[in-house]
Amino acid sequence: MLPASAALAAISFDGAYNLTFVIIIPMMILTFIISSAVKTVFAKYNTIKPASGLTGSQAARKILDEAGLFHVDVKQCKGTLTDHFNPKTNTVYLSEAVFGVCSASALGVAAHECGHAIQHANDYLFVKIRTALVPVCNFTARYSTIIVLVGLLMTMFQTLYSIGTFVLFVGIVFYGVYTLFTLVTLPVEFNASKRAHSLLTRSNILSNTEWASVRKVLTVAALTYVMSFSMSLLYLLRLLAILGSRKR
């Protein structure tokens, strides 16, 4: 969706054009830098071996069992930092760098994903909101950019101006759903990391000293979600600025 900002900028010759180059593009670059930093920090602390000697999968199984989630499976998935919890299959998927690895980073990521599983089991409010938004967001995200572009093109013709403005508004509303989704994701991720600390220390999987390294990994990872929301919000504000310029 975001790359379409260049196309929108080419169509709109108003004050909102500058927002793309002054704010959005630098933030896209910053997002790339943060994503690279996540991999760098993870690799750094992936060399620290915790005293518990547990691998990511073993730690996840221990945490889930202690939480009474015996029905939640722990499986390996391909890739790096592709770890996630799938509520449809009740499965915690751990990447190759986490599943069979004994390191502070691996245990932290595993506990974080278990935190998501526990959120679902406890009907955590923001998880319920985020889950409800998923099907809506999947639909609106697919068509928002196309609708916005169609609306902008229509406003270039006087006879279609009013209809085009309405179409543009609909596209902005569609994109707004995605922005809301990125906003709701923030408390879900921060809460999962908070739970990870409690789960690891309470189960004696990591000491507080070892947790200090894990916290750095999860903190950097959380920044990617913050940047995602910031980018989405700025892009939404830009679209609103374009809509405002069309109404003048």
Image (spheres, rainbow, N blue to C red):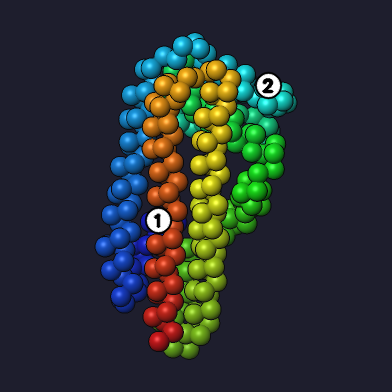
Residue pictured at 53% horizontal, 82% vertical: 163
Residue projecting furthest to the bottom:
159
Q: Is residue 73 visible?
A: no
Q: Secondary structure at mark 2?
A: helix
Which image quarter holds the N terminus? Answer: bottom left
Of residue 139 and residue 125, the one placed in the foreground of this image is: 125
Name which residue type carries label 2. Asp
Is residue 96 placed above or below 52 in the rendered structure?
A: below
Of residue 146 and residue 97, the one placed in the foreground of this image is: 97
Of residue 190 and residue 171, the one placed in the foreground of this image is: 190
Residue pictured at 44% horizontal, 65% vertical: 236
Name which residue type carries label 1. Met
- Residue with the mark numbered 1: 231
Could you tell me residue 164's position as x and y percent? Answer: 49, 79
Could you tell me residue 227's position as x and y percent? Answer: 40, 50
Q: Crowding at label 2, few (<14), some or many (≥20) Cα neighbours within 10 Å?
A: few
Residue pictured at 58% horizontal, 55% vertical: 137
Q: Crowding at label 1, few (<14), some or many (≥20) Cα neighbours within 10 Å?
A: many
Q: Are marks 2 and 1 in contact (CB under 8 Å)?
A: no
Q: With 26 as the anchor, is 191 left or right in this view?
A: right
**Which one is earlier in the sequence, the residue at label 2 or at label 1?**
2
Q: With 12 as the anchor, is 111 left or right in this view?
A: right
Distance between the alpha carbons at the discs numbered 2 and 1: 38 Å
Q: Secondary structure at mark 1?
A: helix
- Residue with the mark numbered 2: 65
Q: Which mark is residue 154?
A: none
Residue pictured at 38% horizontal, 17% vertical: 48
Could you tell me residue 196's position as x and y percent? Answer: 54, 30
Could you tell me residue 23's position as x and y percent? Answer: 30, 60
Q: Is residue 41 visible?
A: yes
